[in-house]
Amino acid sequence: MKDRIKEYGLEGVRTFDIKKFPDERGFFSEIMREDWMEFLGEEWVSQANLSMSYPGIIRAWHRHLRGQIDYFVVVKGAMKIVAYDEETKRLAEVIGSEEKLQIVRIPGKYWHGFKVVGDEPAMLVYFVNKLYDYENPDEVRRPWNDSTIVPEVINGRKDDPRCNKPWDWFYPPHK
């Protein structure tokens, strides 16, 4: 199971590769199991959500200060999912897509969000470990283009050309 887990240089942000079981009808995948303890630890989900976003849409930035953890699974299309720690100036970036199913774990203390990449709408199933409180939501927001988000380290690297500049959701893909 450990070979299915990848860390992203920001404590607690990690992915878990999901297995697809294809047959002549399509495929089946388990996207959350309570016995995936190496990935989940003692956490568990309280709510599941579905979000659809159009091409080029950015949903950022927000965070949860009362302990919420998000588990994202892109089931259609592709998304650039980002988490940022403003204390350490470290940023984690994951490209999630229907082609490579994985769970992206984002501790809510980090500023996070996503952008739909590609030319089709994207669908995201996400799980949270705390129920949404309609009366008192655990959510703090800032603008998607907030120029104070300036990563010094991206996915554990200081030599990424996007380091030490305001985060640009439209920066062209690179290797």
Image (spheres, rainbow, N blue to C red):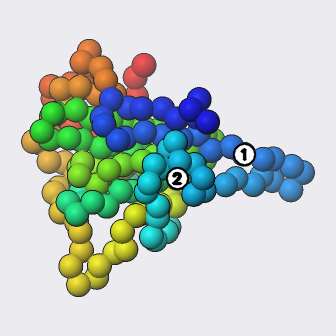
The quadrant holding residue 136 is bottom left
Res. 4 visible in picture: yes
Q: In which quarter of the image is the N terminus?
A: top right
Q: Mark 2 points at which residue?
A: 73
Q: Is residue 158 above or below residue 70?
A: above
Instruction: Please name the residue shown 53% across and 48% down the image.
Output: 37
Residue sitting nearer the eye, 119 or 35: 35
Local SS, label 2: strand
- Image location of residue 64, percent across then percent down: 24, 60
Residue 80: give x, y in percent of width and height: 41, 42
Residue 33 x %, y %: 60, 56
Q: Where is residue 27 in the image (x, y as percent from the top left)?
A: 77, 52
- The single residue placed furthest to the top in the displayed view is 159
Q: Which mark is residue 20?
A: 1
Q: How many marks?
A: 2
Tell me the amino acid under the disc marked 2: Val
Tag 1: residue type?
Lys
Point 43% across, 39% down: residue: 14
User: From the image, which quarter does the C terminus lie in?
Assistant: top left
Residue 72 placement, left or right of 136: right
Q: Is mark 1 on a helix, strand or loop?
A: loop
Camera-side residue of 143 and 30 = 30
Quarter holding residue 61: bottom left
Toward the left, the furthest residue is 148
Position of 69 compared to 78: left or right?
Answer: left
Answer few, some or many: residues within 10 Å of disc 2's Cα (few below 14, many 20 plus, some between 14 and 19): many
Query: Given contact means CB atoms under 8 Å apart, are the residues at marks 2 and 1 in contact?
Result: no
Q: Distance between the residues labelled 2 and 1?
A: 13 Å
Pointer 1 local density, CA inside 10 Å: few below 14, some 14–19, many at least 20? some
Question: Which residue does the image show at 57% across and 48% down from the upper left?
Answer: 36
Quarter location, residue 71: bottom left
Earlier along the polypeptide chain: callout 2 or callout 1? 1
